[in-house]
């Protein structure tokens, strides 16, 4: 069921309420384009919300509204101009991404946040199965176990077995996207950020991805995503969070 709801930050000091996984408070992001006589583009203006375990919040809004920018600020790719992003981390308690040093961001990504970007960044010479397995290997899981888990995901996502050993650079757009999804899902992170995970997939593959997202949601993963097609959004989202152009 989809409901519209706006959150109000409830954080007391640096602590998050028990089931809150992400707290975004007064987040703004502007870009200064120096090559264009310092043109300033505001992508996000005073955005606040909370994301809880077991929710899947769909970010909506027109192209350019700042949806991808918001996910990148949460993942620590973009530095916020003002406001805070706080994340619940199993090992470190509450981590404030805005203000964290690069080492903390790397640790947060390893243990807590899975992120599926719209496009795969292929690593030359690394085969698809190894690429999918690598987040688990980084967590200390034995390589053979990680490769087996990667194989299960690749099978579910209907990637032909003859491709598994090949680097994905030459794969089709939809194949690359499914590799990206498998890589983002393999480590069972408690938080999952999804930027248009089904954008270049056909209906059958979108349905498989929706199933995988729902499985994670039912396990209690806190999910925030941008879903370009309404069918996927209606299937996986528990509520919408609309962003207006800033
Ligand atoms: N690295 C960047 N440098 C400069 N401007 C940027 C950068 N990233 C995003 N922007 C600008 O911020 C605004 C929001 O972009 P963003 O990609 O977040 O939009 P979006 O809502 O994801 O759009 P779409 O639905 O088209 O993917 C745009 O005007 C974009 O030009
Ligand atoms: Mg986008």
Image (spheres, helix red, strand yellow):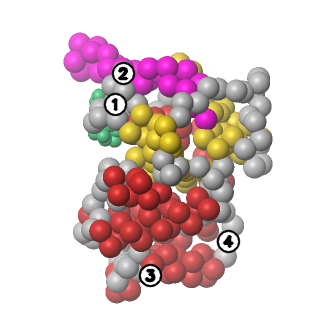
Check disc 3 and report its element: helix, strand or loop: helix
Q: What residue is disc 2 on?
A: 246
C-alpha distance separating marks 4 and 2: 43 Å
Mark 1: C-beta under 8 Å from nearest atom of ligand 1:
yes
Front: mark 4 or 1:
1
Q: Which mark is residue 155?
A: 3
Whether the magenta-drawn stretch holds residue 32 is answered as yes
Residue occupying image coordinates x 50% and y 62%: 213
Which tag, 2 or 1, sits closer to the chain's start? 1
Q: What residue is disc 4 on?
A: 141
Badge 3 vs badge 1, beta-carbon distance below 8 Å:
no
C-alpha distance separating marks 3 and 4: 20 Å
Q: Is residue 96 visible?
A: yes
C-alpha distance separating marks 4 and 1: 39 Å
Q: Is residue 31 visible?
A: no
Relative to 144, 63 lies left or right: left
The span picked out in magenta is: 25-50
C-alpha distance separating marks 2 and 1: 7 Å
Mark 2: C-beta under 8 Å from nearest atom of ligand 1:
yes
Relative to 237, 109 lies left or right: right
Q: Position of residue 232 (x, y in %)?
A: 38, 58
Which tag, 4 or 2, sits closer to the chain's start? 4
In terms of secondary structure, what is the magenta stretch mainly? strand
Along the line of sight, the residue nearer the viewer: 45 or 30: 45
Label 3 neighbourhood size at 10 Å, few (<14), some (14-19), many (20+)? few
Q: Which mark is residue 65?
A: 1
Whether the magenta-drawn stretch holds residue 196 is answered as no
């Amino acid at each position: 069921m989809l409901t519209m709801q706006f959150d109000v930050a409830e954080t007391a000091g640096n602590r998050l309420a028990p089931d809150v996984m992400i707290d975004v408070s007064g987040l703004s992001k502007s870009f200064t384009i120096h090559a264009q006589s310092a043109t300033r583009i505001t992508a996000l203006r005073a955005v606040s919300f909370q994301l809880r375990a077991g929710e899947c919040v769909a970010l909506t809004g027109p192209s350019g509204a700042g949806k991808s920018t918001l996910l990148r600020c949460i993942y620590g790719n973009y530095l916020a101009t003002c406001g805070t992003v706080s994340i619940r981390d199993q090992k470190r308690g509450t981590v404030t991404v805005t203000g964290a040093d690069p080492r903390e961001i790397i640790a947060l990504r390893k243990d807590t946040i899975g992120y599926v970007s719209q496009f795969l960044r292929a690593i030359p010479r690394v085969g698809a199965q190894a690429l999918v397995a690598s987040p688990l290997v980084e967590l200390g899981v034995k390589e053979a176990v990680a490769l087996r888990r990667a194989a299960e995901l690749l099978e579910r996502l209907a990637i032909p077995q003859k491709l598994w050993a090949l680097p994905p650079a030459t794969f089709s757009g939809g194949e690359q996207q499914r590799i990206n999804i498998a890589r983002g899902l393999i480590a069972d992170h408690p938080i999952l950020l999804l930027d248009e995970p089904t954008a270049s997939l056909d209906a059958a593959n979108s349905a498989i991805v929706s199933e995988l997202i729902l499985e994670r949601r039912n396990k209690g993963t806190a999910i925030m995503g941008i879903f370009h097609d309404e069918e996927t959004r209606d299937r996986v989202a528990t509520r919408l969070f609309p962003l207006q152009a800033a």
